[in-house]
Image: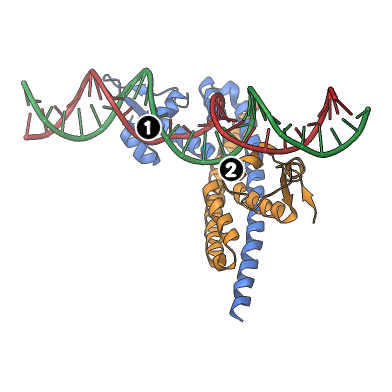
Chain colours: A blue, B orange, C red, D green
Amino acid sequence: MKYYSIGEAAARLKIPESTLRFYEKKGLLPLIERDSAGRRLFSEDQISLLVTVGCLKNTNMSISDIKQYIDWVVAGDSTIEQRLDMLNNHKQVVLAEISSMTESLEGIQEKITRYIKRTQEALR
Amino acid sequence: MKYYSIGEAAARLKIPESTLRFYEKKGLLPLIERDSAGRRLFSEDQISLLVTVGCLKNTNMSISDIKQYIDWVVAGDSTIEQRLDMLNNHKQVVLAEISSMTESLEGIQEKITRYIKRTQEALR
DNA sequence: ATACGACTTAAACCTTGGTTTAAGTCAAGC
DNA sequence: GCTTGACTTAAACCAAGGTTTAAGTCGTAT
């Protein structure tokens, strides 16, 4: 099986190495292997778990909630329902957040429209 | 003209008084008046400016960028183009952010779908 | 006239999510 | 065999965005 160094993993995921080390410290990479020199070895599975972590982070899930998810992944199949609940729940939170941002954006759009009108009037 | 105390303003805007004081310190309430006892007086105009601030904050504009916007508002009509540019720019940033979140949400939805399949299989 | 609640301030404190630093280890190429 | 680059660690540091604390000042109702 192919393994990636932290540098390669960082490059593939487009995040700094320091962030990967930080995530490990926070418990987000619990199953990470090491070579004989103590260097981290990222498997394809780790990378794809980190892609999921990226989706969660990008939708503003907190690191401690992501850790909970990872802990459930590590715990195995008996936690699939919890994971499903968590993700469904998170989905609703994200949808609400997107709605809220969209609503605020409408408020901003109104300002934009007013400003355009004002600049039009100034040209008359 | 009707004025609101900090408590009333906080209630109307649904944010803590401490946040309003913090915003003033950061330069987000530059035109705030005071009564003879030194208490802040929020006019209807201030409140509506704060609603705009709320839209900007809610779409993740930084406080220092919001301050720039407020400074331009205070400076008057000569800055309307700058404000318009800033808001148009911000709009694009927010749209990109929403897209990015929506994309991550699709990744999450795939996980959800897989988990549902897995629980279905477990029942067979 | 006094107690209460709502306000004031400056400064200290807090959390989140990292990044940076300093000192050290190791493998590989020259 | 030595240098170089990629890695290791723990701990310090940072920025953003507030919140909390402590001490004090008012205005008003009793």
Image disc number at residue B52: none
Give whichever of B30, A66 is nearer the camera.
Answer: B30
The quadrant where residue A87 appears: top right
The quadrant where residue B111 appears: top right
The furthest residue to the bottom: A124
Q: Is residue C2 above or below residue B28?
A: above
Which corner quadrant holds the C terminus of chain A? bottom right
Secondary structure at badge 1 equals helix
Residue A110 placement (x, y as % from top left): 66, 62
User: Which amino acid type is shown beneath numbered disc 2?
Assistant: Lys
Q: Is residue C28 above or below residue B91?
A: above
Give whichever of D11, A25 is nearer the camera.
Answer: D11
Residue B35 placement (x, y as % from top left): 74, 46
For residue B34, say whether it is visible: yes
Q: Is residue B13 above or below residue A57?
A: below
Residue B18 placement (x, y as % from top left): 66, 37
Q: How many marks?
A: 2
Question: Do the numbered discs 2 and 1 sit on residues whose CB atoms are within 8 Å?
Answer: no
Q: Which residue is mark 1?
A: A18
Relative side of B65 to C5, left or right: left
Image disc number at residue B25: 2
Secondary structure at badge 2 equals helix
User: Which amino acid type is shown beneath numbered disc 1?
Assistant: Ser
Q: Is residue A107 above or below residue B64?
A: below
Marks 2 and 1 sit apart, C-alpha to C-alpha, by 34 Å
Which residue is drawn at the image coordinates 63% and 55% (left, top)? A105
For residue B120, say whether it is visible: no
Residue A76 placement (x, y as % from top left): 54, 22
Q: Residues within 10 Å of mark 1 (few under 14, many from 20)?
A: few
Relative side of B4 to A99, left or right: right
Q: Chain of mark 1?
A: A
Q: Chain of mark 2?
A: B
